[in-house]
Image (cartoon, rainbow, N blue to C red):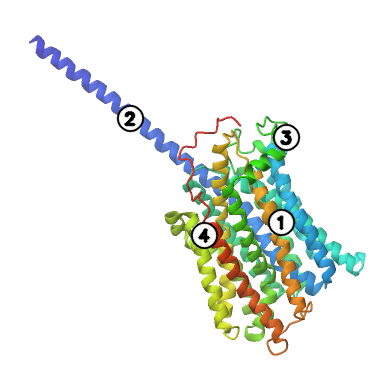
Amino acid sequence: MKYSINRYDLLIKSAIVTNALFVRISNIYNYLVVKQKKVKMSITRSAIAYASTTLAASMMNSIFQFYYVKLFLNSYRINNTWFYRAQLIYLVWNAVNDPLFGYLQDSSKVAFARRRRAAILYGAPIFALSFLIPWIPWTAFGDSDWVVGMHLITSLCFYDGMFTYVLLAQCALFAEIATKESDRQTVLKYSQIASIIGSSAVLFTELVSQNLKYFRHFQVCCIIVATISYFAMTYTARYAINISDTGGSNSVLIDDGEDDNPLSDITLYSLFKQIVTNKQFVFFVLMNFLQIFHNTIGSNFFSIFADNLIGSSLLPQARSIMAGSAFVLPQMLVLLFSPLLARFGSYRCIMVSFFVKFILALAMFLSGSSNVIFLIVFMVLDRSLPEAIFSLFNLSVSDIIDDDRIKYKRRVPISSMIFGTNALFTKPAQSLAPMFVVSVLTDYGYQHGSQVTISTKPELSRAMFNMICLVPIVASVLQILIWSFYTLRGQRAKSHDFYGASV
C-alpha cells in the first residue's frame, strides 16, 4: 500500500514537472517565433528605407550618365582639349575622394561624420543640388571654351563628390543592416525594385524632351527628380536601422556630438595597407575596373551610338523607348534571376554573365552591323546585362568586409573604407572610358553634334560598331581569367558573434 502511494505521488510529480517543462518550452518557442517575426519586420522596414536612397541615386545617376556627355559634346559643344582636361581632373578627384570619405566615415569620432544615416541625411540636399548643375547653361559667363570647360569640371567634381559621400554611407549600410546572406538578399531585392522605378527616369525624360529637343521640358523633369530624390534619401536617414545604432530610429537626428570609435586611433595608411594586401580584394578590384569601364561606355555613349548606327531605322519615339529600356531592364534581370542567385550564389552568377557577354558580343561581331534587329537587341542587352551583374557586386564586397572583420578581429567593420578603397582603383575607369571613346571616334572623323551613316562615313560607322563589339569581348575574357582566382565565393563565418571582438 505504501509502495502504491509513493508510486502514485511519483506519477503526479512527474506529470507536474512534465507540464512545467512543456510550458517552458512553449514559452521559449513563442518567444523565438515572436522575435523572429520582429526581426523579419525590422529587416523589411530597413530594406525599404535602404531602397529609398537607391531610388534617388538611380534616378539621378541614370539621367546624369546618359545625358552629360551628349549634352556637353553636342549642345554646349565643348572642344576636345577642355573635355580631356575635365576628364583628367575628374579622374583624380573621383579616385581620391572615395577613400578619404571612407576613412572619414569609418574613423571619425564625430557622430555627424561617422554615422551612416547622418551622412545621408545632411548630404541629401547638397547631392540633389549637385545633380542640377550640368543642366543649367553658364551663358551668363559667356560662351567661350573655358566657360564650358569649367562648367563640365564643376559639374563632374561637385556631383561625384556628393554621390560618393552619400552612396558610400549607403553601401556601408548594406553590409551593416544585416549579417545573414538571406537578409542581404532581401535588402538587395527591395533595392532592385527601387532601381527599376528610378532607372525609368531616363525613359520619362526621353519621351518628354524628345532626345533633348525640348530642353526646357528636360530641365523641369530634372528639378522634379531632384526634389523626389531629396525626400527619398531623407526617408533612408530616418528609418534604415543598422547594427551600430543603439538609439531610436531618429537618434541620428539629435546625436551630433562626439562618440567613441575604436578605429579612430588607427592611421589611414595602416587601414589602407591592410585592405590592399588582401588578395581577394585585389582580384575583385581588377574585375570591377573592367566592368565599370564597359558600363561607362554603354551608359555615356548609348544614345550617340544608337543615333549613328541605327539612325532612321527607328522612329524617335522608338529610340526613346529603346534607350529607356536599356536602363530599366538591368534591374528587372536581377529580380528575374533572383532564384538563381539564391541557389547558385553571386560568384557563379557573375562568372556565367562574363561568358554570356562574350558569346553575345562575338555573335554580333560576326553578324555585322547590317543586321539592324540583332544590333538593337544586342545594344540593349550589352547595356543591361553588365549593369545587372554590377548590382550584385555589393554581395562580394560584403564578403570581403566580413572576411576583413574576422581576420583583424575588428569590433566595428571598416565598410566605408573598403568601398572607398575599391573606388580609388576602379572609379578612374569612369574617366578613361569616355576619353578613350572620344579619342578613337575623333581619329575617324567624328564631329560633335554630327550624325553619320554607313553611306556617308563608313570608316567612322565601322569604328563605332567595332567598339561596341570588341570592348565587351576583351573585357569578358580578362574578367573570366581574373574572377577564377577569387575564392570568397559566398563563404563567410557562419557565426557572427564577433561584434565584441577587439580592434
Up the image or down, 200 lies above or below 169; here it is below
Work out whether mark 3 precedes mark 1 in sequence or the reverse, and give the earlier one: 3
Residue that protrudes farthest toward the top in the picture? 2
Work out whether mark 2 precedes mark 3 in sequence or the reverse, and give the earlier one: 2
- Left of 294 or right of it: where is 345? left
In the picture of the structure, the residue carrying the numbered disc 4 is 350
Q: Amino acid at mark 2?
A: Ile
Expressed as whole percent of the image width and height from the top left, the position of residue 296 reads: 67, 65
In the picture of the structure, the residue carrying the numbered disc 1 is 227
Judge the density around disc 2: few (<14), some (14-19), many (≥20) Cα neighbours within 10 Å. few
- Left of 148 or right of it: where is 224? left
Expressed as whole percent of the image width and height from the top left, the position of residue 87 reads: 78, 62
Q: Amino acid at mark 1?
A: Thr
Q: Secondary structure at mark 3?
A: loop
Expressed as whole percent of the image width and height from the top left, the position of residue 46 reads: 56, 45
Q: Nearer the viewer, residue 136 or 454?
A: 454
Q: Is residue 234 visible?
A: no
